[in-house]
Image: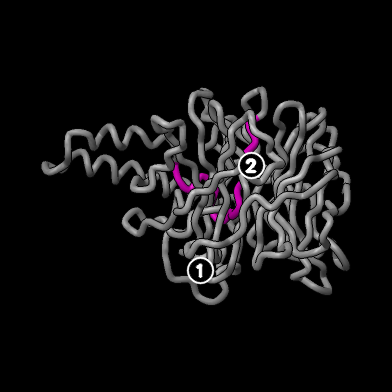
Amino acid sequence: MIPFTSIYRKAFMLAAGILTFTSCATAQTKAVASANTADNCEELPYINPIVPQRADPFVYKDSDGTYYFIATAPEYDRIEIRKSNTLNGLGTAEPKVIWTKHETGKMGAHIWAPELHKMDGKWYVYFAAGEVEDVWKIRMFALSTDAADPTEGTWKEEGQMTTEQDSFSLDATPFEHKGKRYLIWAQAKSPYEGTSLVLAEMDSPTSITGKELIITYPKYDWELKGYKVNEGPAVLKHDDKIFITYSASATDANYALGLLWVDVDSDLMNPESWNKSETPVFYTNAEVRRFGPGHNSFTKSEDGKNDVLIYHARVYEQVRGNSLYDFNRHARARIIEWDENGFPNFRQAERD
């Protein structure tokens, strides 16, 4: 599939904006429209998709309010970053390629799910990659730069993120809590089938230390559709809890978000501290043309008042061939709400 050029990308976003405006205006003029239709339209601050044909989206909001967007490129061959002062502006921002795959050996195929983080005054990109000679030998790798602007820096290859078991692994994401830094990632790790989420402490931005703890593995029916998968962890702190969303099942319409949580004062490396929802919290909704939502990240709204879910989804259900090579997973944004128990409400029934 031909990737979007700058012209096509801008035309796509313009069309999306026209369609959004038209649908709201039409709804508001219908005699049968409910009294709150206009309010519902006004509550959609983001023109979705915010970035077309980008899966596994990750957004980092810097201290100056700049949004940096990074995601899986459709060709699986490079890592690019774009920046904007608004989430809507990311769709027309020019992507800056910071790294391309190797011609031979490691980091030469399936460049997947990059994430951008700032730690200890430097920027780091974590990503997964296969080998040219074995494209499914997926492992985790890191890049770094000390440039103030990650789109302008010279990036250094930090090498592979090693784990105690050398097996299929991807989707590394770090976070800090109570003076410690942790890494969560997805890995094909015994004794469970498929990919589980693994947690460990970090002793540097590019290495882990100590024991590794499996905090979730695929066991419910909705996690086993097509493939046995728990992957794509994302961290969200709220009040007295740390929440981890993750994605489950195959990357088609079966893809869905699950939820883990832990109390902030508990021992994160104790398996008894972790809780898991028995049902998905965000999944396909054909009525609003949202199929296979997943592999998300979290950021803050422009005014800093709301938590925003950044995720990908398709607008159709049927995928021809292998879903990994259908490139129409688009990056989307939606504000999440909080219920009376302090849990995130992903507004499953509502459109973007």
Q: Is residue 33 visible?
A: yes
Please say if 210 is above or below 64.
below
Amino acid marked by disc 1? Lys
Mark 1 and mark 2: Cα distance apart in space: 30 Å
Residue occupying image coordinates x 48% and y 59%: 292
Q: Residue furthest left?
A: 31
Q: Quadrant of residue 187?
A: bottom right
Q: Amino acid at mark 2?
A: Phe
Q: Position of residue 344 (x, y in %)?
A: 46, 37
Secondary structure under the numbered disc 2 in the rendered image: strand
Q: Nearer the viewer, residue 9 or 332?
A: 332
Which quarter of the rendered picture does the N terminus lie within? bottom right
- Queried whether the magenta region covers residue 55, the answer comes back as yes
| Residue depicted at 55% across the width and 27% down the height | 240
Up-down relation of residue 85 to residue 144 (above or below) = above
In this view of the protein, which residue sits in the foreground, 294 or 235? 235
Dot 1 or dot 2: first in sequence order is: 2
Q: Secondary structure at mark 1?
A: loop
Q: Residue at x 76, y 47 (%)?
A: 126
Question: What quarter of the picture does the C terminus occupy?
Answer: top left
Extent of the magenta region: 47-61
Give the camera-side residue of 350 and 244. 244
Q: Which residue is mark 1?
A: 225
Q: Is residue 264 left or right of residue 49?
A: right
Q: Is residue 30 left or right of residue 87?
A: left
Q: Residue furthest front?
A: 272
Q: Position of residue 171 (x, y in %)?
A: 69, 52
Q: Is residue 8 visible?
A: no
Left or right of 260 in this view: 151: right
Find out whether residue 333 is within the magenta segment.
Answer: no
